[in-house]
Image: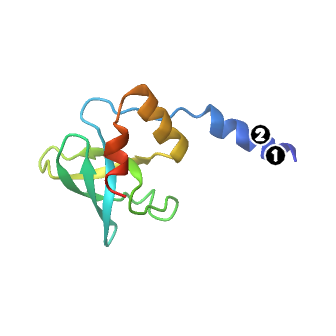
Amino acid sequence: MSKKRDADKTVEQMEMPLPSEGQVICVIEELIGADFVKVRCSDGVSRTCRIPGKFRRRMWLSEGDVVLVMPWDFQPNKGDILYKYSRDEVRRLINMGKIAKEFVESGE
């Protein structure tokens, strides 16, 4: 019983990553396959993003999920997914003014 309480505390204590320089918040539009997804980014660009190996089996993605993306320097229309935001974190991002509510809901 104490293990579960400890696990809940660690999840709450983890900070959600905010987009730093060069990173963009995006919404998943389509699962392409072969560990690639098509995303619509907050900067107005549609990108094809790769799911890195450390997330492939640990983080399941679906259409409409909000993710943090790092665009590639040499191909700006492609990028890597860095983080998947939970529903509570998406609400916090909207309240902080990092993303618009319409941006998240327009894909659904």
Circles 2, 1 touching at the beta carbon (< 8 Å):
yes
- In the picture of the structure, the residue carrying the numbered disc 2 is 6
Q: Amino acid at mark 2?
A: Asp
Q: Residue at x 43, y 26 (%)?
A: 96
**Spatial separation of the CA atoms under disc 2 and disc 1:** 5 Å
Q: Residue at x 52, y 46 (%)?
A: 87
* Residue 59 visible in this rendered orientation of the protein: yes
* x, y percent for residue 10: 67, 37
Residue 88 sits in quarter:
top right
Q: Which mark is residue 81?
A: none
* Direction from residue 48 to residue 9 in the image, left or right: right
Outermost residue to the top = 96
SS of the residue at dot 2?
helix
Q: Which mark is residue 3?
A: 1
Residue 94 vs residue 8, the one in the foreground? 94
Residue count near mark 2 (Cα–Cα under 10 Å), binned few <14, some 14–19, many ≥20 = few
Q: Amino acid at mark 1?
A: Lys
